[in-house]
Image: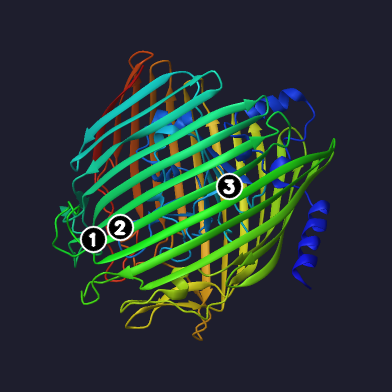
Amino acid sequence: MNRKKLILTACLAGMALPNLAGAQAIDEDNAALEKINAHSVVQNTNLIPTPAYTTIITSEEIHANHYKNLAEALSYASGVFVNPGSLNTSHLVVRIDGDDRVAVLVDGRRVNMDKGIMSGRASYDLDLLPSIMNVERIEIIHGTAGSYTINYDTPGGIINIVTKKGDKRETTVDVAAGGHGAWKVKAVTGGSLDDWSWMAAGGFDNVDYHKYKGTDGDTHEMPNSDNNRREMVYRIDKQLTDNTSLTFDYGHLSNDTGTWFSRKYPQDYNYEKLINHFALTYNYKEDTIAPGYITYYHNYTQGDTYIPGWFNDHEDEKTYSRWENTVDGFDWHDGWRISKDHTVTAGLMYRKTSVDNISTDISNPYNLSGNYNEDISNTSVYLQSVRRFDKLTLTGTSLYNDNSKFGGKYVANGAFDYTADDKTTFYGSLQQIYAVPSLDELYYDNQYVQGNRDLRPETGRKGSLGVRYKLSDKTNLNFNAFIADIDDPIGWYYDGKVYRADNFENQKKRGFQLAIDHEFSDKYKASLSYAYTDTHTDKGDGLGNQVDVNAVAPNSYKAVLTYHDDRWTNNLMLTAGTGRSGNYYSGSYYVWDANLNYKISDDWSTYLKLYNITNESYEKLGSLIEPGDVPAYGRTVLMGMEYTF
C-alpha cells in the first residue's frame, strides 16, 4: 500500500474512532465549556478531560509545597518515579508505569530529544525543564493519550507542563537557604495592558555539596557534587481578535554541575548544560469547543564535559567533549464539532533534529563523546474523533508516521469511558507501540559506548483498565492496571568491555496503581497510594524472561497527611520502596519529608522544608559496582520566604 493510501486509511479510521481529549468538551452546555477554558490557560494544551489515569498538579499545590523544581514536583505524584538516569547523577529521568518512554511537553510542544541520553529508552533530562515559577499546572497521563499529541512511541504516558499567561500586574520573589550550602533566589512577574499580556521568570539555584548517610551508618560528603543553575523564561501574548491570538515563548537555562559516577571511585568531572528555545503560536477559534493552533518552535541544547581536576568556572577553559542537539518543529491542530455527540480533530506534526556529537580532545582517556553528526526528521498526520453514547464514550486515534530513517508506519489507538452511576466510572485503553531508535542508540561511538546502526524499531501493545469510585462524600478511590508486550525492545548491555545498544527479543511490563484520598474535616485530609511494577525482559541470551531489577522499586508507597487553615498549609509525607534487588541496592527505603508553610499576610509567606527527616540511608539509582554506591541526599533543611507585590 502506498503512502497516500495509508494516509487515507488513517483518516477514514479516525472518523470511526473517537478523540481522546474531547470526551468532556462535547457537552453542549456553554457553562461547561467556559469552565474548561477557564482552567486551560492555553486552550490547545487542555489534557484534563481524558478517559485515563490522570494526575493534575495545580499551581496552588506547587506554591503550597514550594517545590524547588519540576522534577521535585513530579516525584510526589502517585505512580511516577524520578531517578538519576544512568551511572551518574548528571541528569534525571521520569518513569510512569515503570517505563522511561514518557513524552514530555511544554504547552503542548514536545521537548523529548531524538538524540537520546543513553538511559534505557528515556529521551529527556528533567533538569532541562523550564522554571517552576511560571507553571500553571502539570498534567500527568498514564498510558495512551490523544488530542494534540499522540504518544505512540511513549507507552509510559505524557507529562504536559502548562505555563502561566500574564493577567494582573504582580511580582513574586522567593529566597531560601539551607543545608548542603544550598541557596536560591527566584522571581516571577506578569501583567497585561489592553490586548497585550506578559510573564517572565528567572533566578539562581545553588547547592555546594552532597551530604548523605552511608550504609555504614556514618554521614559523608560527596566530593565534586556542587550544582549551579541559572534560568529565565519569557511569555508574551497578543490578543488579535475575540477568538485569535499570538503567543511567543523564549527560555534560557545553564547548569554547571559537578558529576560523580561512584562513591567508591569518584572522578572530578564537571558537566555544563545550556539551553535556548523559542516558540511562536497562532491560536484561532478560541471561542469554540474545538480550538485550533499553529506553532513553530526551535530548541537548542548543548552539553559540555570538562577534564577531571579543572575548576568550576569554565569560561576560559576548553571542553574535551561536546554535544549539540538542535530541533526545528511545526505543529498544526484543528477540530470540528460534527454533531451533539461527535467531534473530530486533525493535526500535522513535523520535527527535524540535528545532532553534532564530537570530541575536542581525542587523546583524553576520560573522553565520553559520541563522535557522530547526524540528522533525523519525523512527520505525523493524524485524525481523531469522539463519540458519546449515553453513559459510554468511545475514543480513538489514527495516525500515519513517516521517519527519514525508518520509513512509514500506520498506528491506531482506542479507549473507552463508561459512567455506570454517579459514584462509579470505568475506563480503559488499548495502545499500539511504535518507537524508532534514538540517534545515540544508532551512532554513539567511543571506547566505552557503542551504538548499533542495524537497530530495528520497537513494536507492541499496551492495554490498561481502571475504575474511579466514590466510596463516600469524603472518600475517593482510583484503581488502574496495565500490561504491555513489546517486541525488539532496545537496551544497553555490557559485554565486558563496552556498553552496546541492541534489540532484545521481548519485554513484558505489568502493574497497577491504587490510590485513596479521604477528607477528615475542613482542615485535615490524607491520601494513600500504592504502585506495583513488574518488568521481564528476554535478551535473547537463552535465559528467557529475566526480571529487570535495576529500574524502579517493584513496590512503591506514598502517604500524605495535610493540614490547611487560613494561615497554615502543612504536609507530612512518607515515601517508601520495597522489593529492590540486593545485587544493586542496599535495601528498601522509608523516607519522611515535610513542608511547613505559614501565611504572614496577603503578600508575605514563609516556609520550612524538611527532606529525609530521619536521615535514612538509601539510594534511588542502583549500582553495578556495589549496593549503596550512588547514595541519595541525607537530612536536608531549607528555609525560605516569599513576597508578592
> Can residue 148 be seen here?
no
Q: Is residue 343 above or below residue 268?
A: above
Quarter occupied by residue 467: top right
| Residue beneath disc 1 | 260
What amino acid is found at the position of numbered circle 1 in the picture?
Trp
- Which residue is found at the position 46% from the left and 63% from the top? 354
Q: Is residue 90 above or below residue 335?
A: below
* First along the sequence among labels 1 and 2: 2
Instruction: Return the mark for residue 89.
Output: 2
Give how far apart the Cα atoms at labels 2 and 3 are.
26 Å
Q: Is residue 568 visible?
A: yes
Q: Give the colour scheme of this rendering.
A: rainbow
Secondary structure of the residue carrying tag 1 is: loop
Identify the residue shown where x is 62% and y is 70%.
459
In this view of the protein, which residue sits in the foreground, 77 or 87? Answer: 87
In this image, 328 relative to 366: left or right? right
The residue that label 3 is drawn on is 141
Image quadrant assignment for residue 476: top right
Amino acid at dot 3: Ile
Which residue is situated farthest in the bottom direction here? 542
Disc 3 to disc 1, C-alpha distance = 33 Å
Q: Dot 2 lies on which element?
A: loop
Q: Quadrant of the N terminus?
A: bottom right
Residue positioned most to the top: 601
At label 2, the amino acid type is Thr
Q: Position of residue 61 (x, y in %)?
A: 46, 31
Name the one closer to the observer, 390 or 528: 390
Q: Are marks 1 and 2 in contact (CB under 8 Å)?
A: yes
